[in-house]
Image: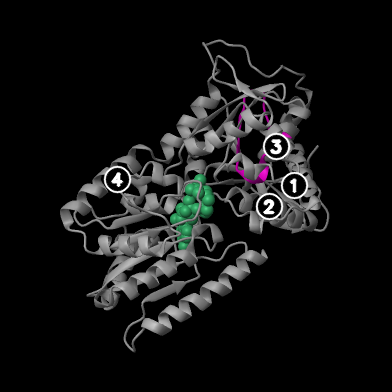
Amino acid sequence: MSRLIVVSNRVNPPNPAEGGEGSVGGLAMALAAALREYSGIWFGWSGKTIPEFTGQLNMQRIEGVTVATVDLEETDYQEYYNGYANKTLWPLFHYRVDLTAYDRSFGEGYDRVNKRFAETLLPLIEPDDIVWVHDYHLIPVARELRRMGVTNRIGFFLHIPWPAHQLVTTLPRHKALVEALFHYDLIGFQTEESLQAFEGYVFSEVDGGKNERGELVAFGQRTRAAAFPIGVDAADFAQIVQGENARKVYDRMMAHSVFRKMIVGVDRLDYSKGLEERLIGFERFLHDHPDMVRDVMLLQIAPISRDEVEAYQDLRARLDGLIGRINGAYAEMDFTPIRYVNRSYRRDELAGIYRASRAALVTPLRDGMNLVAKEYVAAQNPDDPGVLILSRFAGAARQMKDALIVNPNSPEEISDALERALSMELPERKRRWEALFDNVSREDVTAWRDNFVAALRARPGSDGDEPEKPALERQATVRSLDVAAKALKAGPEAKAMRA
Ligand code: GDG
């Protein structure tokens, strides 16, 4: 069977020092499992910067997964990662034109780094490999690989929303970005909504169309695009919540919240997650239901992320102020309504926290999918499940219709949903949870991964179709095999110079 090469900005294999499933998210676990199954390579940035880019590959074998990383230089980090990825594409794709930086140097840095990634990856690609590129940091990778003669199947999955085409056109080089996507054989989106927005752009902005095989045609190229909603490892979550660590945390939380119902929020500290709006909604609830104030407590876990970006520092400062204000107004000497934690927890600890919470507030302003909503459901006690309050603007809302769906911009809707969740009788909680759990278990991360890989392997139309991309000389790849083989033979700590 052909190997799978996964390409993502950061490479996060499960860390054995943290029980194999410490602080890494469910996605990393799933991709690592896919790589073990297809015996592939996981390639990406090491997370380190060096004074000058060398293209040196660092190859390691971690938990049965071959990991290949490369260091970037400081300017790359500033322009590509902090710049175009986090200050341009992330805000824009989350509908925050007001926070979007349209700086030409960021776009140049983005293209440069994507080219560097492609050049560094090239020697690792074997003729039968399939390549799966992840997320908005790496859109141009396929274009660069094609320029170097790579004809392998290459797929792309976008973890964040694809926005309405009017937003995309605010990017100075939006056509080049979309054109770059047409070098993939398959483009995956989280939802039908994102898929339709992408098609909307192709049809109205670049005069593209669809052929009889359902492929998108534009820029003299064709590609396939489809929705592949990502899931979580529900079975694993339901299992780790029974483990010792999860139980300890659960018992601790229950002991601390005797006579009070805990509401939980777990989000990277990011403006797309609607944290301010959530807190204002919670404040509204406390105001509207004075009789319930002492019965509830909100635990907001918000590990700090991307703190070098100003918008994140500003958000952090605003949240500190807002939480201080609410706690100042409603706390008593023996009671605080909001507990706010900026650290991260182990995955099993998180499972225990989810299970101890009577409701979860998952209220992003925009989210590609939102895995926390699914993890919360997976971790519940079937005999006494909690209630999920979910933003209509999370991709997950499409599948999780039995949650209490809210508009996160409305404090009243959040307040009403909280009241409803906290007073919901057991039969309704069970009925809703069963439907949600059924969906989360069926459309789990394994289904997502297998569906995408199967679609990428499949040729459109009947079996035996010719490859759509012209078969070019594979000299570069053949040259590459030596380098990769040497690097791997040299052992786990091996470092290989790029040819
Ligand atoms: C992007 C898209 C899409 C959070 N705090 C802790 C912790 N986490 C884990 C959660 C969850 C993951 O991080 C967050 O995933 P989300 O889906 O909620 O959000 P993003 O990070 O923005 O992810 C999103 C996702 O990609 C996948 O395609 O769903 O829409 O924005 O797994 O559990 N994990 C641990 N400790 C923490 O304190 N261990």
Can see residue 25?
no
Q: Is residue 438 left or right of residue 73?
A: left
| Residue 312 is covered by the magenta coloring | no
Query: Horizontally, is 158 left or right of 274 in the view?
Result: right
Residue 65 lies, in percent from the top left, at: 55, 42
**Vertical relation: 305 (above or below) 226:** below
Q: CA distance from mark 3 to mark 1?
A: 10 Å
Looking at the picture, tell me which residue is in the foreground, 167 or 82: 167
Residue highlighted by disc 1:
110
**Between marks 1 and 4, how big is the CA–CA gap?**
40 Å
Outermost residue to the bottom: 333
Amino acid on which the number 2 mark rests in the picture:
Thr
Asked if the residue under mark 2 is in contact with the one under mark 3, i.e. CB atoms within 8 Å, the reply is no
Query: Which residue is tagged 3?
Result: 141
Based on the picture, tell me whether residue 134 belongs to the magenta stretch. Answer: yes
Residue type of the residue flagged with mark 3:
Val
Which is nearer the N-term, disc 2 or disc 4? 2
- Tell me the element at label 2: helix
The percent coordinates of residue 166 (x first, y second) are 63, 42
CB atoms of marks 1 and 2 within 8 Å: yes
Is 257 on the left or on the right of 113, as rendered? left
- The number of numbered badges drawn on the structure is 4
Q: Which residue is tagged 4?
A: 437
Give, as a single range, the part of the protein colored magenta.
121-141
Residue type pointed to by label 1: Tyr
Q: CA distance from mark 4 to mark 3?
A: 37 Å
Foreground mark, 2 or 4, reads 2
Residue at the right extreme?
52
Q: Nearer the viewer, mark 3 or mark 1?
A: 1
Circle 4 — which element?
A: helix
